[in-house]
Amino acid sequence: MMVAELLKLAPTGEQIELLSAAMTACNRAANRVAEVAFVQRTANKIALQKIVYADLRSEFGLSAQMAVRAIAKACEAYKRDKSIKPVFRTGGAVQYDQRMLTWKGRDAVSILALKGRIIVPVVYQGRWTKVPGAVVRGQADLIVRDGKWYLAVVIDVPEPPGGGEPDGWLGVDLGVVNLATDSDGTAYSGKAVRAMRRRHNRLRAKLQAIGTKSAKRLLKKRRRKESRYARDVNHCISKALVRTAKGTRRGIKLEDLSGIRDRVTVKKAQRSDLHSWAFFQLRQFVGYKAAIAGVPLALVDPKNTARECHECNYIDKKNRRSRDDFLCLRCGHAGPADHNAARNIAGRAAVMRPDAA
């Protein structure tokens, strides 16, 4: 199983200067390639390499492989939308492949700079690098964030041997008011996340209106606080779901919510909540934690899970009396709407595995 991990580096002052110079040169080179790609209307790496390779090496002082990676970066960005010219920040992430970066054990890495290689200590190796048999695969992205340096890597973590068919399934209904509700009736409220998000929106609007240097510094300082909090909440929920499923020898079934934002329409006051809903992140967290724990995971079709009675399978829009309450018009079954939906999800046939989505 492939897992993304962010490893923290501890470069010296001199090494920071060398890494900064390399990052700036690579991104300036990528901007030059993007200009040529936009003018020539081509994202063909071979064709562009013939045009710009020599200039990149002489003008920006890049090594051969750095020039190749700068060309690849510009081409990948231009392919995504050929109607605009890609623009890269001088402090944007730089891709390092195996020719530019090699590991020196687990606590140091050799990184290619403009004037040769430097050995940089790794002070945080992450959780997954410590798993027996875990191996870093492919390229790594060099990132600088708030003056701190990181390597974003992909780690191949061996999955534990499967334990055969599960004894049952734990259905999980995802939502905005309750971020998740399982078929056992446990609800994980999103009230705290929504309250923080709205507080941040008010504070951000206030600071933007002030517009002073101190207000801008505070905005910069707080810009990722909301996402860190939501990420932590999703980690806690995913851990609890996987722990519950593993403890009862069950698998987990989630709704396949791909494209949900394009299909659902809400009132203007609810748009912020819908578009800030990190359901895909929660699904990813559940996915890799379940794989590590050896818990089967499947996705199901979400159609009518909120309208169907899990007791008699009667489907009617009026069964959902309100956001919170469910009352079947046929058999009279009543209860929390999210719990009813989660039980429907637990009983539905899987449509795909998450890694095939």
Image (tube, grey):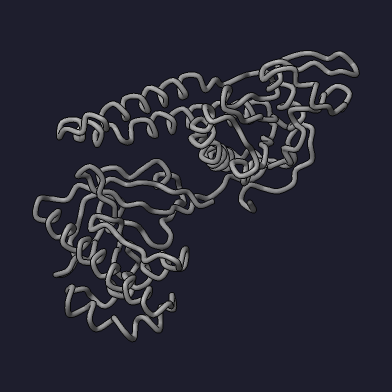
Instruction: List x then y, in percent, for residue 86.
Output: 36, 64
Task: Judge whether 27 appears above or below 182 on screen.
Answer: below
**Residue 183, image x, y percentages:** 70, 24
Q: x, y (%) of residue 247?
A: 63, 26
Q: In this view, does 24 lie to the left or right of 7?
A: left
Q: Is residue 50 visible?
A: yes
As drawn, is 259 to the left or to the right of 146? right
Q: Which residue lies at the image location 43% right of the left edge and 75% below the top edge?
A: 43
Q: Which residue is drawn at 29% across and 81% down?
A: 52
Is residue 168 visible to us here? no
Residue 303 lies, in percent from the top left, at 75, 38
Q: Residue at x 90, y 19 (%)?
A: 330
Q: Residue at x 48, y 54 (%)?
A: 156
Foreground pick, 129 / 50: 50
Residue furthest out toward the bottom: 50
Residue 167 sits in which quadrant?
top right
Number of residue marks:
0
Q: Quadrant of residue 253?
A: top right
The residue closer to the viewer here, 98 or 91, is 91
- Above or below residue 102? Residue 341 is above
- From the viewer's perspective, tell me whether residue 171 is left or right of residue 145: right
Q: Residue furthest left?
A: 14
